[in-house]
Each structure stands twice: as structure tokens, then as C-alpha cells.
């Protein structure tokens, strides 16, 4: 929108000659719309409503096909409202759909509510506008009607804007959020939100307004019939109001913009924003477009003229910008409307198109040459600018008009490729305008630079205006006083005789100069001209030319008086005119088509950034448009709307300047290659004769001289751009450079991690170690080279490296863990994801979402207990069949080297989630196969009766135990698999903790010692509190325990076996089931003196350490009495079996007893409990005999 009511700058309204004057008495510019119009309708709302729609719309664009397929059965369009009970019953019939529905609600209710509130605001806006119009018609506001409001300058502007912005909101919503998506959002909100049942809910009306129109923004999509007029008529608006608004826009220059464009050939540019308003508002009265040929001809003649004079250059505006860079091609948009199409035909005649394109080509070449001349060093001096203000402003207008025409009419958005006529017109324009995007971009760049320099000069001159004027006045007065003294005869001057008349006259002139008043500029200017004439006359009539010194004094005084006239004529109107003429809001979206040209220019010449700064500031003029009315109304939305648009522009600046970090990293890759493969590190001791070999002058020249110098030049280029205020956001080039480097580093490291950790599950042997080594070399190359260039780009490379790599890994861990969470952490909620330095997401290549998931699953695959045997003493896994080593603790050292502490810690966290999931699955399985099986329950009950009390010896124990095992045989396969998976992951967690602890002690011994001591001190205090509750204990809101846990886990100072992973309920027969499970597995194992318990047959695989740790972890999740009962059952089994063997005189200890005793030994060892826990259930003599067997 043009700057109405002269509110471009902070001057008082009414001071801007020829722009838009202050409103009449009783109306205050800058007051709220309610005060202006005599009502309470909040006009600024649409700007604030439009602001959240755009970023929200961006969210809908990011949803992938997987999500659509996943949630397709639970997200409904408006067909839901025909029979909601039917749809809900379909959901209730399937528990999995109910779970999915609940998951979707929990994850998306916040964003769905935000969309609904935005939609509701649009509906509320039009309801408020209609109510305001009704109040005006009914005389609620005394002496005010629609007619009187439209007679007032501000009222006319605001009412036109009110209707126009409603139309814009509807168009933007339909363009950015497709109808089907809107319907599904509204239905989702209706189903999930409690607010729908409130009495004041207007859900039906909102659905009616925003139901699908059938419009699609996809290229080549067919336009629906009667669109958008049928869409605009969903909420009826007073027809006479629409008619009066259109009448005002047709006849008036409502913003008085023509006065800022005095040349007749610039009229269409002056009225371009008003033309955009008229274009939108005409859809509220489509009969004009269809049948009113005279009105349409008048509109086209005024705003899109086709009746050019023979020497005039008029604007061929078949393409217009309607709001914040959204462009429309009238030839396409008005195709269905007979009157509009007929009125445009002359404009679209190919001969006319050719003429206009040729004229603009010539005009742009002419004014571009002028601008380049003005930009030459030293050309734009203060005196030259002050003497040539009209010429400079005309040049500026011509430049901006030509740029506007060329950008709008050559843009891809200006032409539908499926429309033959439009394609032909565009080809004609491209040919006849000799269009070259690089030349047009250079033209824009030079114009922006010229405009920026002029504005800065005028701002400086305005700020110094009064001081300079007073200085010139003082200098002129002093010169006259000195001449008076010369003619007094007191001061001797060569060949100057005493002359009292001249002495008195010069003193009088001095007083007259001093009496000039800065505040009364008109009178002062007139008087100054008279004084200059008087000084010329005195020189002529008194024959003073003969004395050069007197002539010099007179000439100096005239010069000062001339400077005073120039200075008093420096007016703010010039700045305002430049601001209006330099408007680039139409290019808010089109500018993106020049991004590649900008980046290529910067890559070739990094100092180009300084010129781009002026272009970015010129583009910032678009921010005035949405903020003007919000600011005038003192709306609280001002900050949020300013923040949004400023943020969008800063994001674009970052996007353009990202070429500098990209180019730096291109050079850095070469440095990495040279440092990793070519340059040999110099040893600490070196033989003199090998010095030349280690010098490697060729590669070092490539690294040190060429590539490093190139990186320094890029850095210098971006730092040449001074700190700039873009909208309300301050852009610091140093911060911009650092953010750009971080962004490029994140992009490349994330890609290296993604590509480097993709595994072939069928590969034998596993690709894990080779890929880790390869990735480690890549990461080390990045790290070394990044550290190498830090001094040349003035950044803290190690700090950036650690922060960004940790962020990448933590984000990927978070995304991987989302698979195990019902309420997922979305990107916009993640503490690791960033808008300015985004972590890229890659398409999953298998069931894992990220590289950390693939790494974890590959480790689990190669250490699968069904395929491998873990030897605890060696921390090594061996293949059960071939007995070859599969992997060992070296794997975790390699991960530490490649991914660092963050990688190992992230892997540990992911394993925790997997253990939780496995334990939850186990409990579901337990309920299903044990608690709901009557045969199993009867068997367990019989067994418990037979073995009670647990301290006794079971008679005929073999028969009782193995009878129970036989009857429950079918449940043990699934039970074993679940227990072994948990045990396997616990072993991996132990290995990770060992590696973390080792590296912490080695790299940060003080941190390790401090953490250990703090941990011990805290535990001691907590134990003391439980013994004496009067002693202190951390309160619930104290985060100390939570924070110290994160540190301890990162340093490996924790025992994974002591963790409580899930909350559990009481389960009947739980200890006896686990006991039966254990003794059912013992026959599958045999004792080996060197290796301990190993699998008896590879065909029936059971691995001892995962079995023990899985059972131990499972029992840890329940009350300790279950563990007590479980251990008592094992003790009873050992005692009863030994008793039976003794009575039957079997000399050797049975293998099952050896296994059970080994389990107790390992249980005590892993849990670090005292031996008396085991000895409480098994007599010492049995343990003594067992040790002789070992």
C-alpha cells in the first residue's frame, strides 16, 4: 500500500508537500481506526491475521506422503459432517486406529488449534466489518454514514483497505493452504477440541467460509468455475458499500500518489497499488467484470492504459503485484470475464506489446548509463546534489519504473506455460526488451546503490541543516563586519580609503544577515536573495572591482548566502518522494529468481556484498506495507508482525550470502584432501637430509597460499557489509558469517554421517568396522581442516565443531527415539533444530529414521545372541558356528573416535528406549500367553503347592520340576527371545559406559574425579536423610539430581543394570515363571572351564550373559520381594536336586545344579551385592563342592 497520510517518517502530518496531506479537523493521524471512522472496527487486524497464515502454511507443505498414508484413515474432510457417528464407530471398531487417532491428537492439537484460530480470525474480521457497516447505516455514530466516511481522506483509505485486505486474506489462504487440507484441519479441530461445544462457537460459519473452493496452486491446475467471486460471496457484504468503494477507487487518487510522480508517463506506477486494490475488490462485484464494458474500459484506460500518446512511455501492466509480491497476470485472470477481457484486448495487442517492450529496453539502457555515471567516485558531492535535486529524482523514478515493468513482465509467474497466447506475449517481451537477467540484476543493484547513497546524503544534510545554516550566516555576517572595519580606516588595507557611507552600509548588511530567522524559511529565503542582489550592486556601483581583496570578501559572502538558500531548501519531502519511488514490495517474491545471479556475482567478487546491502535495504521498504496501519493504531501486534516480515527478509539475506560459506567449504574440501592424503605430519625429531621430503613445498603451496588465501578473501567480502538494521532485526556480518559457516558445516557433516553409515545386512563379514574407520577419517579431516582455517576467518573452530556435531547427533537421536514415543517431538519443538542453521533430514533407507538408528541396529544385528556368543572375560563376541571373532570392545573405541562422546551417549540413550519398548512388549506377551492361559495357570498353581514352603526340600524334585517345564514348553521360545534381547542391549550399554568412563578419565580426569565425589556425597546425604528424615533432601523442584544424572551418564559413571526402565503392576506367579524359564534353559547349556556357560548345540542357541542380564533387568523392574522369591526357588531347586542325587548316590554334581549355582554367582557379581544374598538360600558346603568342580 502507498504511505497514506504522510506517515513515512516521524515528521508532523501535513508537512509533506504534494504527498498525502493530513486529514481534516477532528481526525488524528496515527490514532486508532475506531477514532478515525467514528466506530470500533479494528482495521489493523488483517495485517496481523495474515502474518501467522504464511508460516503456518509452510508447515503444511512439509508433510510427506508417508504421513498422509499413515494418518489417512483418521483425518476426514467435510464428508465427516454428513454422518459423524458412522465415522466414529469405524474408529472405535479398530483399537489400532483409536491408538493412532490419540497419537495424532496428542502430537498435533497445538498446531491444528493455531490454524483454527487463524481461520476464525478471518471470519471474525468480516463479521466485524459487516457489523460496523450496519452500525453506520443505522446511525449508531451520530452524523456519520458510509458516504461521509468516504468523503474523509483517511476514512476513504481505510474503508477501501478493509475490503481489499479481506479479499487478500481469502486469496492467500486458498493459495497457501489447499481446500482439502483446510477441511481436514477444521474437522480435526472439531473432533479434538473441547471448544466446539461452547455456546459462542461459530464453527459452522467458519466451515462455510473456508470449505474447499476446488482451486489448486499446482502448475497446470485448472481454475474452478466462478472463482474467486463465488468464494468472496460466501459471507454477503453490503452491495452499496462495495459499489461506493469501487467508485472511489475508479475516480480518486485515494493516496495522492500522482503528486509523487509528476511525469504523465509514470501515472500507472503511481496508481499501481491502487490498481491492485481495485483488481481484488472487483471480484466482490463480478457483474462489472462480466457486462459493464464502459466501466472496465475506464478502469483499463486509467490503471492499465492502452491509449498511449506518440511520445509518452506508459506502463503496460497486464501483470500486477496484489500484495507482498503476489503477482497476477490480468490476461489470464480476466479471461472468463467478457467486459474485462474486451477492455484488455488493446493492451495485449502484439504490436502494442512490441512497442512497449522496445521503449522500456531503450529507457532502461539510457537511465542505467546515467546511474553508472552518478555512481562514479566523487561525482555525487553535496553541492552537485543540492543543485540537481529534480534531475536526480527524475532519474530515480525512471529507474524504478523500468525495473518494475521489466521484473513483472519477464517473471515466470507472469505466464502460464499452458496458455499459448500468454506464452507468445512473453516471448515477444523477452525478444523486444532484449531481456538479460544479469543486466537487469546489475541495473537493480546500481539503482539500489544510487538510491542508498542519495538517501544517506539527504539524511545527513537534514540532520546538519540548521547547524550549517547558522554557520553560513555567521561567516557571512563576520565578512561584512570586517569590510565595515576596513572602510572605517582603522584597519589598514592596501589602497582602501576611508568611506563612512560604505562602512555604515556594510554594518547594516551584517545586521541584516544576523537577523535572518531559520524558522521562517520563506521570509529568510526571500531576504537572502535580496541581500545577494545588494552585494552585487554595491560592487558594481562603487567601483570596488579594482580591489581584489574587497571583491574576494564580497564573493565569499555571496557564496555563503547562496549556501544558506541551498541549505534552507533541503526538505524532507525529497526523502519521502525517494521512499515512494523506490518501493520494491512488488518484488518480495520475484527477487528470489535472481538469487543464483547474486550468488555467482559474490562467488566471483566477494566485495559485491556491499552493493547487495543496498538492495536488501531497498527490499526492506516492503515492510512498511503491512506495518503502517498496525503502527498507527498502536496495536500490540506490531512487534510480532514486524518480527515475522523482518525475519523473512533476514532469512533471504542469509540464503543469498550462504554462497560465501559454500565456496569456503569447497576450498576446505581440497584442504581436507591434501591434509588427509598428501601432507605428511612432521615428526618431533627429524633427520636433516629428510627435511626436503617433509617440506612438501608443492602441496603446502596449494594449501597455505592459494586455498587459504581464497578463504580469507571470502571472509573479507562478507565482513565488508556493515552492521545493518533489516526491519527490526540487526544483521551483524560477523554473526552472519559464523551462522553461514555453521550451516554449511552442519549440512556437510550430516550428509557424511548419513552416507557413511548405510549398511548392507547381508554383507559377510559386517561392513560396520570398515565404514566406521572410513567415516572416522572423513570426520577427522573435517575437524583438522576446520581448526586449521579458524585464524583466517576469525572464528572459534573447536567450539563451533563441538556445538554443531553434538547438535547433529542429539537431534538424530531425538528423531530416532520419536519412534518409541507416543507424543513425538516435532522439529519446531526440538531444542536441537534451528531455523537459521537447520539440520537436514534424509529419506530413511530402512526401518531406521536416521544414521544413529542404522548404527544401533547394525550393532544389534551382528551381536544377535541367536548367532553369536558373548565371552564376558574378553568383552568379545564370537560366531556360534564358526567360532570366529565377530566384534569386541574395540568397536566402541572406534565409535568414540568417529562420533565422539555425543555419539556414544546418543547410542546409549537409544538403547534405553529400545529396552523400554522390549520390556513393554514382554509384559504384553506375559499377559497374553500366561495370564490368559488356564492350563499354564493350573500348572503354576500345582507347582507352587508342591514347592511350598520354599525353605523345605522338594521330594521327587526332578519329576515335579520337569513335569511343570514340559507343560509350559510352548511359552518359552517367545520368552527367551525377549529376555535375550534385553540382556544383549544391557551388555552393549555396559560396554558403552566402560568406554565413556575410560575416555573421561583419560581426557578429563578432573571432571571424572569431581563427578564421582559429587555423586558419592549426594548418595551419602540421601541415605542419611532416609535414616534421619530431619536431615536435608533435594526438593521436587530442585533439578540437581536430574542434571547430575545427565553428566554421570555422559561420563559413564553409572550402572545400566540398576536402572528402572518401566513402571509395573503386580503379576501373579511372576517369580515362579522366571524360575521355570531359567531351569528350562539350563539343559541347553554346558559348563566350559575356560569360557564358563556356553551353548550346547548351535542349532538351539542360548547365550549365557544376555540370559543372565536379561533376567536380572526384568526382575529389577518389580518389587524386590519377587527377586527374593525367585532366588529362594533357585536355592530350593539346588538343595532338592543335590539331596536327590545324594540319596541316589550320584557321585557328580548335576549339570543343571552347576548352571543354577553359576547363575547365583553371576547374579551376585553383576548386582555387586554381598555373597550372603546367595548363601541365604544355598548352604556353604554346596558352594564349596561347586568350586571344586570349577
Image: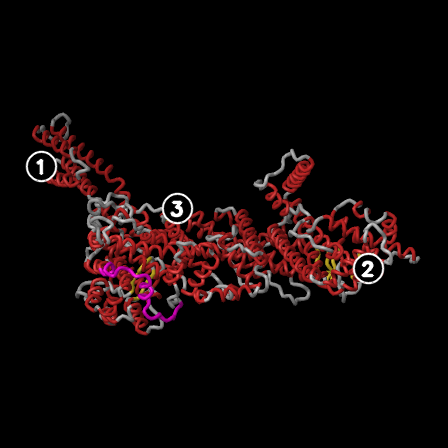
Q: Dot 2: few (<14), some (14–19), or many (≥20) neighbours within 10 Å?
A: some
Q: In the figure, is residue 917 to the left or right of 235?
A: right
Q: Which residue is mark 3?
A: 723
- Magenta stretch: residue 232 in it? yes
**Distance from the alpha carbon under mark 3 to that under mark 1:** 54 Å
- Magenta stretch: residue 396 in it? no
**Distance from the alpha carbon under mark 2 to that under mark 3:** 82 Å
Image coordinates for residue 844, horizontal then vertical, percent: 56, 63
- Displayed quadrant of residue 923: bottom right
Image coordinates for residue 947, horizontal then vertical, percent: 81, 55
Q: Tag 2's secondary structure?
A: helix
Picture disc at residue 538 = 1
Image coordinates for residue 147, horizontal then vertical, percent: 20, 54
Q: Nearer the viewer, mark 2 or mark 3?
A: 2
Q: In the figure, is residue 291 to the left or right of 1166?
A: left
Q: Earlier in the sequence, mark 2 or mark 3?
A: 3
Q: Tag 3's secondary structure?
A: loop
Q: In the figure, is residue 524 to the left or right of 585?
A: left
Q: Nearer the viewer, residue 857 or 886?
A: 857
Q: Nearer the viewer, mark 3 or mark 1?
A: 3
Image coordinates for residue 112, horizontal then vertical, percent: 45, 57
Q: Is residue 340 above or below residue 960?
A: below
User: What segment carries the magenta color?
Assistant: 218-243
Decide if residue 372 is in sight here.
Answer: no
Q: Dot 1: few (<14), some (14–19), or many (≥20) neighbours within 10 Å?
A: some
The number of numbered discs placed on residues in the rendered structure image is 3
Which residue occupies 28% across, 46% down?
Answer: 30
Picture disc at residue 961 = 2
Which residue occupies 32% across, 45% down?
Answer: 634
Q: Earlier in the sequence, mark 1 or mark 2?
A: 1
**Distance from the alpha carbon under mark 1 to that under mark 2:** 135 Å
Q: Nearer the viewer, residue 565 or 105?
A: 105
Amino acid at each position: 500500500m502507498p504511505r497514506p497520510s504522510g506517515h513515512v517518517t516521524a515528521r508532523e502530518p501535513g508537512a509533506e508537500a504534494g504527498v498525502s496531506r493530513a486529514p481534516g479537523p477532528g481526525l488524528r493521524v496515527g490514532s486508532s481506526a475506531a477514532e478515525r471512522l467514528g466506530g470500533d472496527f479494528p482495521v489493523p487486524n488483517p495485517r496481523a491475521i495474515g502474518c501467522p497464515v504464511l508460516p503456518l502454511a509452510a508447515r503444511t507443505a512439509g508433510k510427506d506422503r508417508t504421513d498422509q498414508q499413515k494418518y489417512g484413515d483418521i483425518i476426514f474432510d467435510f464428508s465427516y459432517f454428513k454422518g459423524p457417528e458412522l465415522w466414529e464407530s469405524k474408529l472405535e471398531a479398530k483399537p489400532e486406529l483409536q491408538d493412532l487417532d490419540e497419537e495424532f491428537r496428542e502430537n498435533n492439537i497445538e498446531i491444528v488449534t493455531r490454524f483454527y484460530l487463524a481461520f476464525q480470525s478471518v471470519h471474525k474480521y468480516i463479521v466485524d466489518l459487516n457489523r460496523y457497516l450496519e452500525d453506520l447505516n443505522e446511525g449508531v455514530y451520530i452524523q456519520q454514514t458510509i458516504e461521509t466516511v468516504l468523503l474523509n481522506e483517511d476514512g476513504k483509505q481505510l474503508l477501501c483497505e478493509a475490503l481489499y485486505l479481506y479479499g487478500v486474506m481469502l486469496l492467500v489462504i486458498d493459495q497457501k493452504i489447499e481446500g482439502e487440507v483446510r477441511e481436514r484441519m477444521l474437522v480435526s479441530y472439531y473432533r479434538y477440541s473441547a471448544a466446539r461445544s461452547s455456546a459462542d462457537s461459530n464453527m459452522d460459519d467458519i466451515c462455510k467460509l473456508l470449505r474447499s473452493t476446488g482451486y489448486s496452486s499446482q502448475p497446470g491446475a485448472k481454475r474452478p468455475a466462478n472463482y474467486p467471486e463465488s468464494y468472496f460471496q460466501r459471507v454477503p457484504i453490503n452491495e452499496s458499500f462495495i459499489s461506493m468503494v469501487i467508485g472511489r477507487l475508479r475516480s480518486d487518487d485515494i493516496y495522492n500518489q500522482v503528486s509523487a510522480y509528476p511525469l504523465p508517463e509514470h501515472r500507472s506506477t503511481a496508481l499501481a497499488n491502487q490498481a491492485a486494490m481495485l483488481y481484488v475488490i472487483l471480484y466482490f462485484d463480478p457483474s462489472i467484470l462480466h457486462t459493464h464494458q464502459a466501466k472496465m474500459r475506464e478502469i483499463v484506460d486509467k490503471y492499465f492504459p492502452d491509449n498511449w500518446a506518440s511520445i509518452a512511455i506508459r506502463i503496460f501492466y497486464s501483470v500486477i503485484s496484489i500484495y507482498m509480491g503476489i503477482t497476477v497476470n490480468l490476461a489470464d485472470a480476466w479471461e472468463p470475464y467478457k467486459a474485462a477481457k474486451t477492455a484488455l484486448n488493446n493492451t495485449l495487442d502484439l504490436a502494442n506489446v512490441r512497442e512497449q517492450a522496445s521503449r522500456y529496453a531503450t529507457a532502461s539502457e539510457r537511465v542505467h548509463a546515467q546511474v553508472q555515471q552518478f555512481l562514479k567516485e566523487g561525482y555525487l558531492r553535496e553541492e552537485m546534489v543540492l543543485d540537481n535535486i529534480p534531475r536526480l529524482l527524475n532519474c530515480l523514478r525512471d529507474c524504478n519504473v523500468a525495473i518494475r515493468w521489466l521484473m513483472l513482465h519477464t517473471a515466470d509467474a507472469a505466464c502460464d506455460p499452458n496458455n499459448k497466447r500468454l506464452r507468445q506475449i512473453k516471448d515477444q517481451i523477452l525478444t523486444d526488451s532484449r531481456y538479460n537477467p544479469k543486466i537487469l540484476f546489475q541495473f537493480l543493484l546500481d539503482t539500489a546503490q544510487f538510491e542508498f547513497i542519495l538517501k544517506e546524503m539527504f539524511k545527513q544534510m537534514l540532520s546538519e541543516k540548521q547547524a550549517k545554516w547558522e554557520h553560513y550566516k555567521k561567516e557571512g555576517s563576520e565578512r561584512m563586519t570586517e569590510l565595515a572595519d576596513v572602510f572605517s580606516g582603522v584597519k589598514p588595507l592596501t589602497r582602501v580609503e576611508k568611506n563612512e557611507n560604505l562602512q555604515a552600509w556594510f554594518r547594516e548588511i551584517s545586521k541584516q544577515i544576523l537577523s535572518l530567522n531559520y524558522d521562517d524559511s520563506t521570509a529568510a529565503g526571500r531576504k537572502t536573495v535580496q541581500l545577494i542582489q545588494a552585494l552585487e550592486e554595491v560592487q558594481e556601483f562603487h567601483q570596488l572591482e579594482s580591489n581584489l581583496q574587497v571583491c574576494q570578501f564580497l564573493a565569499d559572502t555571496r557564496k555563503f548566502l547562496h549556501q544558506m538558500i541551498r541549505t534552507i531548501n533541503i526538505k524532507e519531502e525529497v526523502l519521502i518522494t525517494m521512499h515512494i519511488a523506490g518501493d520494491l514490495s512488488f518484488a518480495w517474491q520475484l527477487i528470489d529468481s535472481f538469487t543464483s545471479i547474486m550468488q555467482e556475482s559474490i562467488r566471483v567478487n566477494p566485495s559485491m556484498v556491499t552493493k547487495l546491502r543496498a538492495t536488501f535495504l531497498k527490499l526492506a521498504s516492503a515492510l512498511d506495507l503491512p506495518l503502517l496501519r498496525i503502527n498507527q493504531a498502536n496495536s500490540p501486534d506490531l512487534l510480532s508482525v514486524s518480527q515475522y516480515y523482518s525475519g523473512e527478509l533476514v532469512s533471504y539475506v542469509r540464503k543469498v550470502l550462504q554462497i560465501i560459506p559454500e565456496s569456503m567449504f569447497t576450498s576446505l574440501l581440497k584442504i581436507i584432501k591434501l591434509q588427509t592424503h598428501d601432507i605428511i605430519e612432521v615428526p618431533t625429531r627429524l633427520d636433516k637430509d629428510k627435511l626436503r621430503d617433509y617440506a612438501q613445498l608443492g602441496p603446502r603451496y596449494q594449501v597455505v597460499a592459494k586455498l587459504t588465501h581464497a578463504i580469507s578473501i571470502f571472509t573479507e567480502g562478507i565482513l565488508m557489509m556493515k552492521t545493518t538494521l533489516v526491519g527490526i532485526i540487526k544483521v551483524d556480518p560477523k554473526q552472519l558469517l559464523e551462522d553461514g559457516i555453521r550451516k554449511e558445516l552442519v549440512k556437510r557433516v550430516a550428509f557424511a554421517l548419513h552416507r557413511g553409515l548405510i549398511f548392507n545386512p547381508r554383507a559377510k563379514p559386517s561392513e560396520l568396522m570398515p565404514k566406521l574407520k572410513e567415516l572416522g577419517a572423513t570426520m577427522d579431516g573435517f575437524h583438522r581442516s576446520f581448526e586449521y582455517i579458524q585464524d583466517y576467518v576469525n572464528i572459534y573452530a573447536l567450539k563451533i565443531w563441538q556445538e554443531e556435531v553434538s547438535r547433529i547427533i542429539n537431534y538424530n537421536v531425538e528423531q530416532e527415539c520419536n519412534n518409541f514415543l507416543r507424543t513425538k517431538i516435532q522439529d519446531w519443538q526440538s531444542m536441537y533444530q534451528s531455523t537459521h542453521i537447520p539440520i537436514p533430514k534424509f529419506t530413511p533407507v530402512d526401518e531406521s529414521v536416521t544414521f544413529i538408528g542404522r548404527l544401533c541396529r547394525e550393532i544389534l544385528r551382528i551381536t544377535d545372541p541367536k548367532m553369536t556368543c558373548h565371552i564376558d572375560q574378553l568383552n568379545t563376541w564370537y560366531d556360534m558356528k564358526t567360532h570366529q571373532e565377530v566384534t569386541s570392545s574395540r568397536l566402541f573405541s572406534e565409535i568414540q573416535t568417529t562420533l565422539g562422546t555425543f555419539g556414544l551417549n546418543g547410542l546409549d540413550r537409544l538403547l534405553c528406549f529400545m529396552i523400554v519398548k522390549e520390556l513393554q512388549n514382554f509384559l504384553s506377551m506375559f499377559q497374553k500367553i500366561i495370564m490368559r492361559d488356564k492350563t499354564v495357570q493350573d500348572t503354576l498353581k500345582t507347582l507352587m503347592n508342591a514347592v511350598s514352603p520354599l525353605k523345605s526340600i522338594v521330594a521327587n524334585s526332578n519329576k515335579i520340576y520337569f513335569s511343570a517345564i514340559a507343560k509350559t514348553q510352548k511359552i518359552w521360545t517367545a520368552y527367551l527371545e525377549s529376555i535375550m534381547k534385553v540382556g544383549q542391549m544391557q551388555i552393549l550399554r555396559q560396554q558403552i559406559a566402560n568406554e565413556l568412563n575410560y575416555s573421561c578419565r583419560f581426557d578429563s580426569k578432573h571432571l571424572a574425579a569431581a563427578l564421582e565425589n559429587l555423586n558419592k556425597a549426594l548418595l551419602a546425604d540421601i541415605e542419611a536423610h532416609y535414616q534421619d528424615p530431619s536431615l536435608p533432601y533435594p526438593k521436587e523442584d530442585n533439578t540437581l539430581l536430574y542434571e547430575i544424572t545427565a553428566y554421570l551418564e555422559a561420563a559413564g559413571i553409572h550402572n545400566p543394570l540398576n536402572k528402572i526402565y518401566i513402571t509395573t503392576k503386580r503379576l501373579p506367579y511372576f517369580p515362579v515363571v522366571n524360575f521355570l524359564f531359567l531351569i528350562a534353559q539350563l539343559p541347553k547349556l554346558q559348563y566350559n572351564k575356560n569360557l564358563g556357560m556356553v551353548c550346547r548345540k548351535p542349532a538351539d542357541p542360548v547365550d549365557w550373559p544376555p540370559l543372565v542380564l536379561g533376567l536380572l533387568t526384568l526382575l529389577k523392574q518389580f518389587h524386590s520381594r519377587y527377586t527374593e522369591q525367585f532366588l529362594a526357588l533357585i536355592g530350593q531347586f539346588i538343595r532338592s536336586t543335590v539331596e536327590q542325587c545324594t540319596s541316589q548316590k550320584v557321585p557328580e554334581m548335576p549339570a543343571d545344579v552347576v548352571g543354577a549355582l553359576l547363575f547365583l554367582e553371576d547374579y551376585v557379581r553383576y548386582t555387586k551385592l554381598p555373597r550372603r544374598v546367595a548363601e541365604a538360600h544355598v548352604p556353604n558346603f554346596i558352594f564349596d563342592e561347586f568350586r571344586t568342580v570349577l
